Image: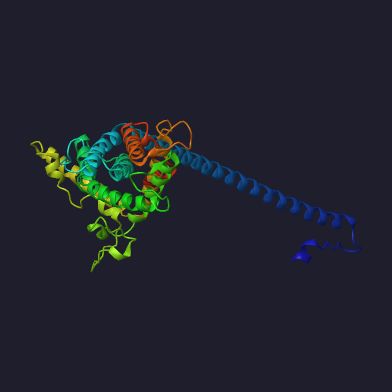
């Protein structure tokens, strides 16, 4: 076929040049037509691909703008929830926890009037105040972030009504923090008291001075509080059964309580874990009459139970304990920065008696815990606490 196409036809007689030229002209024209057809096809294909690419780019850019808008809305909601948590919710709850801590560390008030407090009691109250405030701040932050996350998702799904109304949010925070303020703070105060007494014995060893004649510099007080924080962090990672006897610290094997079936969760969890099935119906009160009000009450209670289950899961995670240690680190650093040098003396070598130094430590902890811009602000700005709060979303 190929040879027949390109072979020049022979004229009768001798071959002529016109026949040969006509064959080559036909061949060249055929090639030109083929090239023109190929170019036209490629141009049409390119135009189609270009139009498809333009449509795909438009869809991608629209989707990207939608993703950016969604991310912007999410970050705005996260910032709003953080502002409400740090400025309104946490200070009020922390004040109640601080009063409960003071009541737990100072006993039932049977001390005789005028009797001086022992240094170990003042130091234990300072440690318990810092630890309880750290735990309370992280607990409230976790609860508020979970409430805000659920509300944001419900709004994105266009579900009708608020996820939790004001009464439901108040009931949820009460169920989350009341158990810690009533029971957990007392256990934490007992642990802090045992740790302080143990650390005092070891801290004064080798100094050739007893508790009555001991004297501390500001750096001694900061170092002692740091040792108490490290011991407290280790102690609260072990099963809580060992604290049936507060004097038996978990790392002191000789006095450790024998438990036939030890629980695997840490003591932090036993203090902070809210009840599994709180009675939200009783907390919300009697619903208004009407089928619509009853349906709304059922929806609110269902949402409360769902968020409570999420809260319990988050608190039981190891990431919560890591964030809590970061919060305690920030609290102790803030306490060390706020401890005034002027009470110890004009020089860094100036000393105070142990009793007076303990009172300075206690007063400093109480002052920054009652200041919204002090202890709570340092905990909220800690990088580990911020990262944990953002990861909930």
Count of residue discs: 0
Quarter of the image containing the N terminus? bottom right
Q: Residue furthest right?
A: 14
Name the spot of residue 191 as percent of width and height, x first: 28, 51
Tell me the quarter of the picture where residue 225 sits: top left
Q: Is residue 237 visible?
A: yes
Q: Is residue 388 visible?
A: no
Name the spot of residue 216 as percent of width and height, x first: 41, 41
Residue drawn at x 30%, y 65% as measured from the top left:
254
Identify the coloring. Answer: rainbow
Residue drawn at x 46%, y 41% as measured from the top left:
63
Name the spot of residue 233 as percent of width and height, x first: 36, 52
Residue drawn at x 23%, y 37% as measured from the top left:
99
Q: Residue furthest bottom?
A: 260
Tell me the quarter of the picture where residue 393 sits: top left
* 10 relative to 210, above or below: below
Instruction: From the viewer's side, name the closer residue of 228 and 29.
Output: 228
Name the spot of residue 271 as percent of width and height, x first: 26, 51
Left or right? Give the position of 179 relative to 353: left
Tell me the quarter of the picture where residue 236 sits: bottom left
Left or right? Give the position of 288 relative to 30: left
């Amino acid at each position: 076929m190929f040879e027949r196409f390109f072979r020049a036809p022979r004229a009768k007689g001798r071959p002529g040049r016109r026949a040969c030229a006509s064959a080559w002209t036909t061949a060249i024209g055929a090639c030109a037509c083929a090239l023109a057809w190929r170019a036209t096809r490629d141009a049409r294909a390119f135009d189609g691909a270009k139009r498809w690419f333009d449509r795909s780019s438009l869809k991608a850019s629209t989707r990207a703008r939608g993703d950016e808008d969604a991310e912007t809305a999410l970050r705005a909601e996260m910032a709003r929830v953080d502002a409400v948590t740090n400025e309104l919710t946490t200070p009020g709850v922390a004040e109640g926890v601080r009063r409960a801590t003071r009541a737990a560390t100072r006993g039932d008030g049977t001390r005789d009037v005028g009797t001086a407090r022992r240094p170990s009691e003042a130091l234990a109250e300072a440690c318990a105040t810092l630890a309880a405030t750290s735990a309370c701040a992280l607990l409230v932050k976790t609860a508020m972030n979970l409430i805000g996350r659920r509300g944001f998702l419900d709004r994105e799904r266009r579900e009708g009504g608020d996820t939790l109304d004001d009464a439901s949010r108040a009931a949820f925070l009460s169920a989350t923090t009341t158990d810690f303020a009533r029971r957990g703070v007392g256990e934490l105060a007992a642990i802090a008291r045992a740790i302080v007494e143990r650390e005092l014995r070891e801290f004064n060893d080798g100094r050739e001075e007893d508790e009555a004649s001991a004297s501390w510099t500001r750096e001694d007080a900061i170092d002692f509080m740091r040792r108490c924080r490290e011991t407290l962090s280790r102690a609260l990672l072990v099963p809580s059964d060992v604290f049936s006897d507060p004097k038996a610290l978990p790392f002191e094997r000789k006095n450790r309580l024998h438990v036939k079936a030890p629980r695997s969760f840490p003591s932090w969890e036993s203090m902070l874990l809210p009840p599994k099935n709180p009675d939200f119906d009783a907390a919300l009160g009697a619903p208004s009459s009407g089928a619509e009000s009853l349906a709304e009450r059922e929806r609110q209670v269902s949402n409360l139970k769902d968020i409570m289950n999420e809260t319990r899961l988050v608190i039981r995670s190891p990431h919560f304990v890591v964030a809590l240690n970061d919060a305690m680190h920030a609290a102790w650093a803030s306490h060390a920065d706020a401890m005034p040098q002027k009470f110890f003396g004009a020089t860094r070598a100036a000393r105070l008696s142990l009793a007076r130094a303990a009172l300075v430590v206690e007063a400093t902890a109480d002052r920054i815990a009652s200041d919204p811009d002090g202890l709570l602000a340092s905990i909220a700005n800690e990088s580990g606490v911020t990262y944990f709060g953002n990861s909930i979303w």
